[in-house]
Image (cartoon, rainbow, N blue to C red):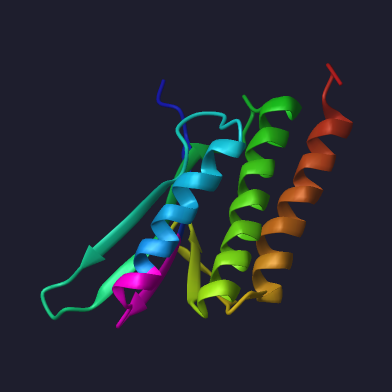
């Protein structure tokens, strides 16, 4: 039985200079070790298209919520997502970058120069928090 996977992608694209890209990648490598990841850690990427446009960001795949989810695992996955959003806020503010966030191929919103859209705060973080509260409340093994 295949395990359902969700994916969160954050990217910033355009004419990014080498200094900002290097700062982004180094900062992520330095900071990502502070979190105890449930599975694979989020991966940073730096890509250049054939027109010279550069794209940097993070991609993170994790277990999808569902009937097999336990409150403990779901809590840790939620902590990872909150950490990623907070880290992107910090680095985007520091470097003046704009990140688009997508969750399972659905556009969520933006983190613009350190400020997170309400769409991310409400559509991802608050929604996940309510879902986790429901799971904890309804779990027979609280």
Question: Which residue lies at the image location 50% right of the left edge and 29% below the top edge?
Answer: 39
Is any atom of residue 109 visible in this view? no
User: Residue 109: x, y in percent?
Assistant: 57, 73
- 11 lies left or right of 71: left
Q: Looking at the figure, which quarter contains the N terminus?
A: top left
Quadrant of the snapshot with the C terminus: top right
Residue 20: quadrant of the picture: bottom left
Up the image or down, 32 lies above or below 56; here it is above
Q: Position of residue 127 (x, y in %)?
A: 73, 56
Q: Is residue 122 above or below residue 133?
A: below
Q: Is residue 89 left or right of residue 29?
A: right
Q: Is residue 94 part of the magenta span, yes or no?
A: no
Specify start and end residues of the magenta stretch as a single range. Answer: 10-20
Query: Residue visible at 62% across and 43% down?
Result: 80
User: Which residue is depicted at the point 33% across and 78% down?
Assistant: 16
Pinpoint residue 59: horizontal percent, then vertical percent: 42, 51
The quadrant in which residue 38 appears is top right
Residue closest to the eye, 84 or 8: 84
Q: Is residue 12 magenta?
A: yes
Please name whichever residue, 110 or 89, is drawn nearer the observer in this view of the structure.
89
């Amino acid at each position: 039985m295949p395990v359902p996977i969700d994916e969160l992608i954050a990217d910033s694209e355009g004419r990014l200079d080498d200094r900002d890209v290097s700062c982004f990648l180094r900062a992520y490598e330095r900071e990502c070790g502070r979190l105890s990841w449930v599975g694979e850690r989020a991966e940073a990427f730096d890509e250049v298209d054939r027109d010279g446009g550069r794209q940097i960001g993070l991609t993170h795949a994790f277990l999808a919520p569902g009937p097999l989810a336990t409150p403990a695992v779901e809590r840790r996955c939620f902590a990872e997502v909150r950490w990623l959003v907070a880290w992107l806020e910090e680095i985007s503010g520091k470097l003046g970058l704009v990140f688009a966030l997508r969750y399972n191929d659905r556009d969520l919103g933006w983190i613009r120069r350190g400020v997170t859209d309400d769409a991310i705060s409400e559509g991802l973080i608050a929604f996940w928090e309510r879902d986790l509260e429901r799971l904890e409340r309804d779990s027979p093994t609280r």
